[in-house]
Image (spheres, grey):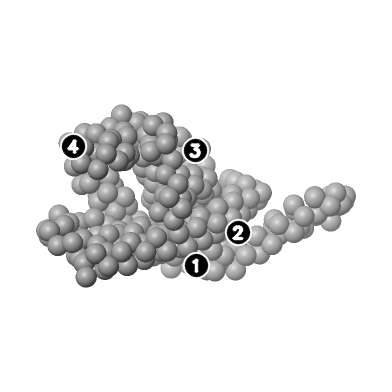
Amino acid sequence: MSSSYNSYITSAIQYTVTYMGMSTVLIGVVGNTLNIVVFLSLKTFRENSCAFYLMFMSFVNIGQLITGQLSRVLITGFSIDLTIRSAFYCKFRAFGVEMFQFISLTCLCLATIDQFLATCSHVYWQQWSNIKLARRLTVISTIFWILYSIPYLIFYNQIVSSTTNQTSCTYSNVNFQQYHVYMNNIILPGALPLLITVTFGSLAYRNVRQIAYRTIPLVRRELDKQLTNMVLIQIIFSFFALLPYFILNVFPMVTNINSNPISSAQFSLSINIAACILYLYFAYPFYIYACVSKRFRQQLFYVLFELHFNRWRRRIVPANDICLEPK
């Protein structure tokens, strides 16, 4: 009974990771690419610090989807495990997954804080929302997370099991494994970003509700409303995408779940489903923006059809006939 049940769970994990994972990768790469195209094509976004964070996050999300989720699909769904075929890839995948994850979450936190600053009523706080500072913080945070993830290049290795004689890509240092479980699985990718984004997102929402009573240019007011709505909805989505994986990583610490084979198999299925949900965070920002912001949809159509499609057709448009960016 236990053997057949475990076989059923294994099949369920395989189908879930394969189909949900592959669709997440395809949808995510397309969506993040469209984000990059829109943010880079419009001067409105290129000069805005919050949009810069969201654009850079889209680059990072593509790296995370390819390095993390695509590898999981190949390993679980097609038994193509490059981590046991290449010692370099074993180390690089662990390094890349952690690095891309932390950079992406940092960009979301910075974008949320930036929108809080941009919508503040005090000029002193508004001046901290600027594109030069955004570029510097992005470079600094990227370098920090690259350096922070270097131990994965050291402590992740191909290990041959003494009982099964099978090779696996895993930790070669027990102390670093414990550090990873507590810090890099629970606090840094779960509790800390959720706390920061929910706190500053709530403050930004409060500021936006009062923005109509301030004397500021209409274009700036509409852009702040647009970006704040986009970021706030992404925070809500991120909360539900990150929370299940965060909770399930805590669960083995308070229960002895591995003592029962059936419970262990059920937990394995749950953690794989939660991981698939987690990767939705990296895949769906574009679709969130397109759903919640009419202005973003207009900008998308303008960029794709008025700018790039016409350029592709090599149509010469007089300067005075060029369409303005939609509001």
Q: Which mark is residue 212?
A: 1
Q: CA distance from mark 3 to mark 1?
A: 29 Å
Q: Could you tell which of marks 4 and 2 lies nearer the N-terminus? A: 4
Disc 4 vs disc 3: which is toward the camera?
A: 4
Residue type at mark 2 is Val
Residue type at mark 4 is Val
Mark 4 residue element: helix
Task: Tell which of 22 and 48 is nearer to you.
Answer: 22
Q: CA distance from mark 4 to mark 3?
A: 37 Å
Image: 242 above or below 36 = below
How busy is the neighbourhood of tag 1: few (under 14 within 10 Å), some, or many (20 plus)? few
Task: Tell which of 291 and 207 is nearer to you.
Answer: 291
Q: Which residue is mark 3?
A: 135
Q: Which mark is residue 174?
A: 4
Q: Which residue is mark 2?
A: 219
Q: Quadrant of residue 241?
A: bottom left
Q: Could you tell which of marks 1 and 2 lies nearer the N-terminus? A: 1
Q: Could you tell which of marks 4 and 1 lies nearer the N-terminus? A: 4
Disc 4 vs disc 2: which is toward the camera?
A: 4
